[in-house]
């Protein structure tokens, strides 16, 4: 979602006449888009800001002025603390107010005195004020839903991105068609809780994600559809059917479980047990036996015992995730879990994370190795590190490197996979 927001912010700036600078030193305007989900990410903002301030000073010695802005969830959470800790920041906007950037920059141009901060949860939807979303190449993000009402006890999202809202069906379809007309082959529908999408159609009727997927499926020229991130308890039968009936829907689903222990899931305020999660996975696999799953895990949640942690390993062994994101629990001020007793020692969190990641990576490597020798359609999104190399994604979101000319950029090419590591695949064009 942050990558998507940055893309939208860049497009506002292009409309205002800005263009991308070759380096920070050459930038008249520097905006940091920030994440507050874990402490490490949030703290990084202040160290990055310190470095940016030095650049601002260097530029000032050359007679150049620099505007520094911060946007995103750290702003929403820290509010005025941002400018208290980093007084050289000119403006700070929350994730729901960055559409007000043109007005903010105009005010700064009128020689403002104090830093400008806007962390309102606005009545208007930013999507109605942003310039049209533009294709980012063969693969584009499209936000359809934002915010979350789940209030998992560890999570800041409901406080930073606000309550759950869905964009109207017609707006989403219009945007999807525009993206495809600009060359997008793959659309990834985004939302913090994307499968509880309930946008209204032209007649005012609330529609589900499944309805939307079927509509998007009809767009000619579009070849791949994904949606992320889903909440297990909100996976409906209708959505499961989409995995059977919509061929454009990629056979990969990110479905966070967080923990395999029902006691921990309850303390996390998750509305599902590990058994229910496995049932959903089984139904999805029945709908499409080729589906691969990825997940998010938190280790060291307050009160997590060795037995609870074992239950997490057990779930991993049962589902055999093909990819996963795993984190040490991070205590976030203002969330209920931060005040829970039995916080887990850092050392134990680290040990558990190491064990969990070893297991997750072994399944990921196995899955990648099984791909060797197969021919897979790869959507090439960027140039590789070496000349003459492109990097793309398989239907399972594996990164794949291949020796290919740039005429294949933003195209889907059949690739024979020749090598696999935990994090990527290599291959060559079929028949070459
Ligand atoms: N500590 C660690 N991980 C967290 N996540 C969310 N909040 C926290 C936290 N306080 C993880 C969850 C979520 C992912 C986006 O980030 O696993 O699914
Ligand atoms: Fe955070 Fe996801 Fe839980 Fe919402 S469902 S509170 S975004 S972890």
Image: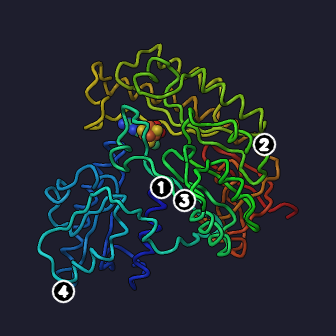
Q: Looking at the picture, how far across and down is residue 359, in whole percent?
A: 57, 28
Residue under pointer 3 = 168
Mark 3, residues whose alpha carbon is within 10 Å: few (<14), some, or many (≥20)? many
- Cβ atoms under marks 3 and 1 closer than 8 Å: no
Distance from disc 1 to disc 4, alpha carbons, whole Å, reads 36 Å
**Which comes sooner in the sequence, label 3 or label 4?**
4
Looking at the rendered structure, the secondary structure element under dot 4 is: loop
Q: CA distance from mark 3 to mark 4?
A: 47 Å
Viewer-nearest of labels 1 and 4? 1
Query: According to the image, label 4 marks what residue?
Result: 63
Q: Which residue is mark 2?
A: 244
Give the mark nearer the N terminus: 2 vs 1: 1
Judge depth for marks 4 and 2 and give the one in front.
Answer: 2
Q: Residue at position x 60%, y 27% from top?
A: 277
SS type, badge 1: loop
Residue beneath disc 1: 1
Q: Residues within 10 Å of mark 2 (few under 14, many from 20)?
A: some
Cβ of mark 4 under 8 Å from ligand 1: the answer is no
- Whichever of callouts 3 and 1 sits on the residue coming sooner in the sequence is 1
């Amino acid at each position: 979602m942050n990558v998507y927001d940055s893309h939208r912010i860049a497009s506002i700036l292009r409309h205002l006449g800005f263009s991308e600078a070759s380096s920070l030193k050459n930038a008249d305007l520097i905006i940091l888009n920030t994440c507050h989900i874990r402490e490490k990410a949030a703290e990084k903002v202040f160290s990055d800001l310190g470095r940016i301030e030095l650049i601002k000073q260097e530029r000032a010695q050359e007679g150049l002025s620099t505007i520094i802005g911060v946007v995103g969830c750290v702003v929403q959470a820290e509010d005025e603390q941002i400018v208290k800790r980093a007084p050289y920041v000119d403006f700070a906007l929350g994730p729901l107010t960055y559409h007000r950037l043109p007005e903010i920059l105009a005010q700064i141009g009128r020689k403002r005195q104090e830093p400008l901060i806007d962390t309102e949860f606005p009545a208007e939807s930013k999507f109605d004020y942003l310039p049209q979303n533009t294709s980012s190449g063969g693969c584009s993000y499209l936000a359809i839903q934002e915010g979350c009402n789940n209030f998992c006890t560890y999570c800041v999202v409901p406080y930073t991105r606000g309550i759950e809202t869905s964009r109207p069906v017609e707006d989403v379809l219009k945007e999807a068609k525009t993206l495809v007309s600009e060359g997008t082959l793959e659309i990834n529908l985004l939302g913090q809780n994307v499968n509880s999408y309930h946008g209204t159609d032209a007649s005012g009727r609330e529609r589900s994600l499944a309805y939307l997927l079927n509509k998007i499926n009809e767009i000619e020229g579009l070849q791949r559809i994904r949606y992320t991130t889903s909440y297990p308890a909100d996976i409906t039968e209708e959505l499961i059917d989409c995995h059977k009936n919509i061929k454009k829907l990629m056979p990969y689903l990110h479905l966070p479980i967080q923990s395999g222990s029902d006691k921990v899931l309850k303390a996390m305020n998750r509305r599902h047990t590990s058994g229910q999660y496995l049932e959903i996975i089984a139904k999805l696999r029945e709908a499409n036996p080729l589906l691969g799953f990825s997940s998010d895990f938190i280790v060291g949640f307050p009160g997590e015992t060795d037995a609870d942690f074992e239950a997490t390993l057990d779930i991993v062994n049962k589902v055999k995730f093909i990819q996963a994101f795993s984190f040490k629990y991070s205590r976030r001020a203002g969330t209920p879990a931060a005040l829970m007793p039995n916080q887990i020692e850092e050392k134990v969190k680290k040990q558990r994370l190491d064990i969990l990641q070893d297991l997750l990576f072994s399944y990921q490597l196995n899955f990648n190795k099984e791909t060797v020798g197969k021919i897979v359609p790869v959507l090439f999104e960027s140039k590789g590190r070496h000349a003459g190399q492109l990097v793309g994604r398989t239907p399972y979101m594996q990164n794949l490197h291949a020796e290919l000319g740039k005429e294949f950029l933003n195209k889907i090419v059949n690739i024979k996979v020749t090598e696999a590591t935990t994090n990527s695949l290599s291959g060559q064009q079929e028949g070459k």
